[in-house]
Amino acid sequence: MRKIISLSFLGILILLLSCRSDDDQNPGTIINNGLGIIQISGDLSDEEAINLINTNLGDNTHTLLIKNTTNLTKLDFSDITTLVFLEIEDNAKLTNVKFPQLTTVASEITVYNNAQLETIELDELQYTGVITIESNPFIAAIALPKLIEAEDISLSRNLSIETIAMSQLQSVSNGISITEMPVLNSVSFSNLKYCQGNLRIYANDVLENIELSSLISTGIDFSYSKSEGDISIYDNNITLLDLQNLEQTTSIVINEQSLTAINLENLKTSEKILLIAEETLIEVNLSNIEDFSRLLIFAPANMEALMAKLVAITPPITNTTIQMSGEVSVKTKEYIDILENGDNTVSIRD
């Protein structure tokens, strides 16, 4: 049902972009409403590209393809406010692209494998479908300061990106993936509340800061009965992870060898929680957990303190599998007995 609705919306939008009533045209006046699809490719110079744009751009334009250019270095699309498709791919010398008025891309933005691209300006973008930015070795930052909603966000293998900031983003109807960016050190989704698919951030070697403190849920979409919604954060360099407003998710997998603290104070529902650290994990806040089936915490720095928190949870944990690693103190053994008396299965490995 969702795909049908989405395709219908795109069809209507393309129709609106491609048609204008004769009533809007003055008799005897020739109006150029532009081509629906504009493709810029080949060995066009910057000046030739400008002439092509000026000749063919108009109200009908819904798709812009900038692909396989060999001489083009920069483009400025100051008059475009709405598109359906935007593709910028495989351009040899393109360094800068500006869309200073673009607010909506209904279906897809793809920025892929541009050998010299340094900046893409999308400062006014508010709504988009799928956005993919991949394998652009010289882009230093991704900033979408006005983006509110997106369907899917995929950012990967951009070797120079240090920061990702989407401060107004509130919801993503599918998933978010941020992977394999060796100098990325900061990711900020400070107002993101709902991600209705998977949230995956991994293999970013120096990434220390992830701002997700407003996130309420992942994988919960009652309109479409959608249930998948894993949070997977691993192989970065994170020490603190604040998910203080997270209430429900399908599963959480955190494998961070420098992690010292994770805040899940409002988490109520998650089928599985897996936390792995290299004996650095001191603080785990799970004070409101109600509905989960498996809790696995490996290499906590203070297993006794963690067990004490689990015992203190009200209502008491029942019918749950709990696995941990580390040394068992006398007090820890008492906590294990309490948990096992509540029909939980507790196992400790060395």
Image: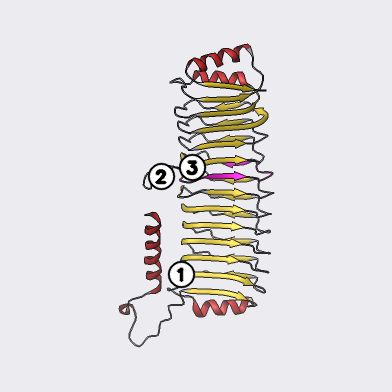
Alpha carbons under labels 3 and 1: distance apart: 32 Å
* Sooner in the amino-acid sequence: mark 2 or mark 3: 2
**Dot 1 amino acid type:** His
x%, y% of residue 294? 52, 29
Q: Nearer the viewer, residue 134 or 192?
A: 134
Query: Which of the two discs, 1 and 2, sits closer to the camera?
Result: 2
Q: Of all residues shown, which one is farthest toward the left?
A: 23
Mark 1 crowd level (few <14, some 14–19, many ≥20, 10 Å Cα): many
- The residue identified by callout 3 is 229
**Dot 3 amino acid type:** Gly
SS type, badge 1: loop
Q: Work out which quarter of the rendered image holds the N terminus and state it.
A: bottom left
- Indicate which disc residue 21 carries: none
The part of the image, by quadrant, that contains residue 231 is: top right
Mark 3 crowd level (few <14, some 14–19, many ≥20, 10 Å Cα): many
Q: Is residue 198 magenta?
A: yes
x%, y% of residue 193? 46, 43
- Name above or below for residue 217 compared with residue 152: above
Question: What residue is shown at x 49% (from left), y 25% (from top)?
Answer: 320
Q: For the magenta stretch, what is the residue range?
A: 196-211
x%, y% of residue 48? 60, 79
Q: Is residue 154 left or right of residue 227?
A: right
- The residue identified by callout 2 is 221
Q: Is residue 204 visible?
A: yes
**Dot 2 amino acid type:** Asp
SS type, badge 2: loop
Alpha carbons under labels 1 and 2: distance apart: 30 Å
- The residue identified by callout 1 is 62
Alpha carbons under labels 2 and 3: distance apart: 10 Å
